[in-house]
Image (tube, grey):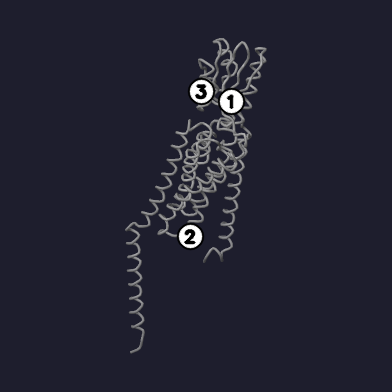
Amino acid sequence: MSSHSNPSGMGRKLTMVVAGLAVLITAMLCAFALPSLHSGPHHVPVGVTGSPQAVEALRQDVDGPEWDVRPYETAGAVEAAVKEGDVSGGLAVTAQGVDVYTATAGGPSATSALTALGNGVAAQNKTRATVHDLVPFTEDDPRGAGLTAALMPMIFGGIFPAVILGSVFPGHRGLRIRLTGAVLFSVVAGAAIAAVLQFGTHSVDGDYGLTALGVILGMTALSTTLLGLQALLGITGFALGSALVMLLGNPLSGLATGPHWLPEGWATIGQLLPPGASGSLLRANAFFDGAGANFPALVLTVWAVLGCACVLVADRRGRHPRGARSRAVTTSYSGTAAAARSEVTSGLTPK
């Protein structure tokens, strides 16, 4: 008896579906809400320079769970560290005042907190603080809205190829075509997204080629990962991959605030997932001339390789001789059964 004609079986299936959806929604709420509730500066690297007494006082007062104070010899060294992305900002404490060096494009939230910190230090020393934004957003997009908005098209650019190419080129024979199509789509769409950000909204002003390569790598990692999971595990793999990038990768990317504004464990997970690594790579290429791009590029390369490997494993599994043997056994069994039925029929036919 099928489950469709068995009320108890249908009830169990309905219960499992409802419970699974409830768990999914709860996980979505936790992924989006918990990091936001605990957001704030978490070991934000800040460079400081000044007299030994001033630096030591800062380290005693500030160094802790919120700030990671790193001393430098000169104000020029602090500026260079900020421009290269080694630190999120810096303070130069002198008798004349406090120079605050920020990088708004590296994290607007950290910039605001560092400015407040500089004002507090200046008040303690009865001087004034002067803010120098060394890596700002562009004049046409001073709040970085375009940069933040770029993440969702990149995520959906990974989801769409798995859905659409799977419908146009279904089955095992279409696996390699789908993989080729996903890579080609990532190249075209990635270059288009970078062009819109650079020449359309003027949200970034770095080297277009470098920015485009970063976006292409990010979209390739997203699309091949989802395509590979779909090829290997079917609809279950696609659902797991989509949940991974949407429910965890999106809220934990830190693209809007900077990764140091998320709790440390959450931030680490976010930077190891394709959306977070894609956002960090885009930020590094667009505003820091590629400084700090090595780690996110490596993360994305690993995801892309894993996605391609999943597709190739699924392709090889579909071509495995064991499948042919199974079909041969099935054919042989069918032939034997047909022959047996023929003999029985002939025996029952009156002569």
Discs 2/3, front: 3
Alpha-carbon span between mark 3 and mark 1: 11 Å
Q: Which residue is mark 3?
A: 80
In terms of sequence position, does the residue under pointer 2 or pointer 3 come before the other? 3
> In the rendered structure, which amino acid carries the disc numbered 2?
Val
User: Which of the two residues, 52 or 321, is positioned nearer the viewer here?
Assistant: 52
**First in residue order: circle 3 vs circle 1:** 3
State how far apart marks 2 and 3 are (Cα). Answer: 51 Å
Residue 36, position in %: x, y?
A: 62, 35
Q: Judge the density around disc 2: few (<14), some (14-19), many (≥20) Cα neighbours within 10 Å.
A: few
Report whether 267 appears left or right of 173: right
> Residue drawn 56% across and 13% down?
50
**Quarter occupied by residue 55:** top right
Tell me where residue 115 appears, x and y as whole percent: 63, 23
Disc 1: CA contacts within 10 A as few (<14), some (14-19) or many (>=20):
many
SS label for mark 3 = helix
Q: Which residue is mark 1?
A: 102
Q: Nearer the viewer, residue 224 or 24?
A: 224
Rendering quarter of residue 202: top right
